[in-house]
Image (spheres, rainbow, N blue to C red):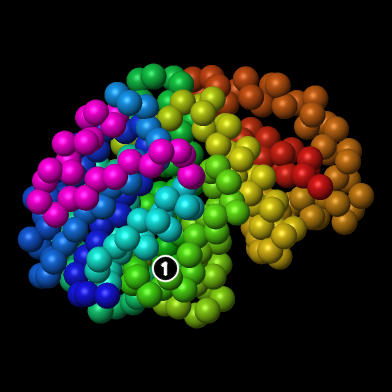
Amino acid sequence: MRAGLSILIPVFNRDVTALIGSLCRQASDWPGEVEIRLLDDKSKEEYRVKNRPLGNLGGVWYEELPANVGRAAIRNRLASSASYNWLLLLDNTSQLLDNKFIARYHAAVGRAPVLAGGVSYAAQPPADPALRLRWLYGRQREVRSLAQRQAAPYDQLLVNNLLLSSALLRRFPFDESLRGYGHEDTKLGWQLAGAGVPVHHLANPVLHAGLETAAAFLQKSEQAVHNLAYLLHQRGLGTDSRLVQAAQRLRRLWLGAGVRAALTLCAPLLRRNLLSAKPSLRALDALKLFWLLREK
C-alpha cells in the first residue's frame, strides 16, 4: 500500500459536485498523492447524471453499482479499492467549513492511527418543519465538544469524517450483516476500544448539510434499533448502551411487558410529536425503547 491519502465517499441520491470541488482545491495540502473515490449505491438516475462528470476530474474515480448494497458493504468496497495507506471516510451529506480541512488532518497524522474530526449542524433550525427532528437530533446528540469527545474517545464514534489507516480497516471491516441503517460505526468503536487502538479527536468538523425528513429519520432509527438488538443477541455487543441497559433493567424488574404495552398505546402520540414542528427527543427515546422491547 503506497503512502498517500484516499478519500472515500459513498454516494446515494445526492449531488456531490460542491463537496468534491472543495476537496480537490485542498488536495495539495496533503504532502503526497491524493485520490477521491466515489461509489454510487444505486441512486436515482437524476443524481447519477449530475455526478458522472466528476469521474473526468484528475484524481477522482467515480463508479456506479448495479444494485444497492448498503452502508457497511459500500464502505468496505471503497476501502478495498483504495490506493493509499490513509483513508478519509466522509458521508455524501458533508460540507467543508473552511479551506484548512485537509491541512488540519495532515498536521495531526502522527498522533494516532485513528483521527476523528467531528460533525456540526447549522445554528438555526431549518425553515421546513419536516426537517426539524433530524436537525435537533444532530445538534443535541451528535455534536459534542472536543473535550467531551476526548474524554470518551470511543463513545458515539461517527464514521463520517474519520481518518484511519487502511491496515486498521482491513483488520476491522464494517459488519455487512447489519442491513440498512445504523450501528456499523458503533461496532467499529467497540472493536477499536477492545483492541486498545488509540483514537484522537480534533476540532476539524464537517457540516452535516443533508437533513432528511422526520418520517425518513424515524424509519432509519427503527432500523438502527433492530441492528442494535442484533449486535446484542448475535454478537454479545452493546451491553453498555444506555438504551439496552434501560430495557434490561425493566426486564429484570419484570416490567418489560407492561412498559411495552403502555408504549404500544402511546406510540401514535409519540410519532405525532416527532413529525410535528416541535419534536421532543424524549419522545424519540421512548419510541426507541418501545422498538427494543419488541425485539426478542
**191 w.r.t. 279: above or below:** below
Q: Is residue 150 visible?
A: yes
Q: Position of residue 37 (x, y in %)?
A: 26, 52
- In front: 269, or 225? 225
Q: Which residue is mark 1?
A: 169
Q: What residue is drawn where x is 72% and y is 39%?
A: 291
Image position of 18 (left or right of 237)? left
User: What residue is shown at x 57% (from left), y 32% (from top)?
Assistant: 218
122 on left or right of 232? left
Q: Up-down: is 261 above or below 70?
A: above
Viewer-nearest residue: 234 or 162 = 234
Q: Residue at left 29%, top 62%?
A: 82
Residue 239, quarter of the rendered image: bottom right
Residue 211 in percent (x, y) is at 39, 32
Task: Say which of 179 and 269 sits in front.
Answer: 179
Q: In the image as oriented, which residue stretches furthest toward the right?
A: 254
Which residue sits at x=73%, y=44%?
292
Task: Please say whether residue 99 is visible from this viewpoint.
Answer: no
| For residue 267, above or below residue 117 | above
Where does residue 99 sit, x and y in percent of width and height?
Answer: 12, 52
Quadrant of the image containing the N terminus: bottom left
Q: Which residues are magenta?
A: 47-70
Q: Position of residue 70 (x, y in %)?
A: 49, 45
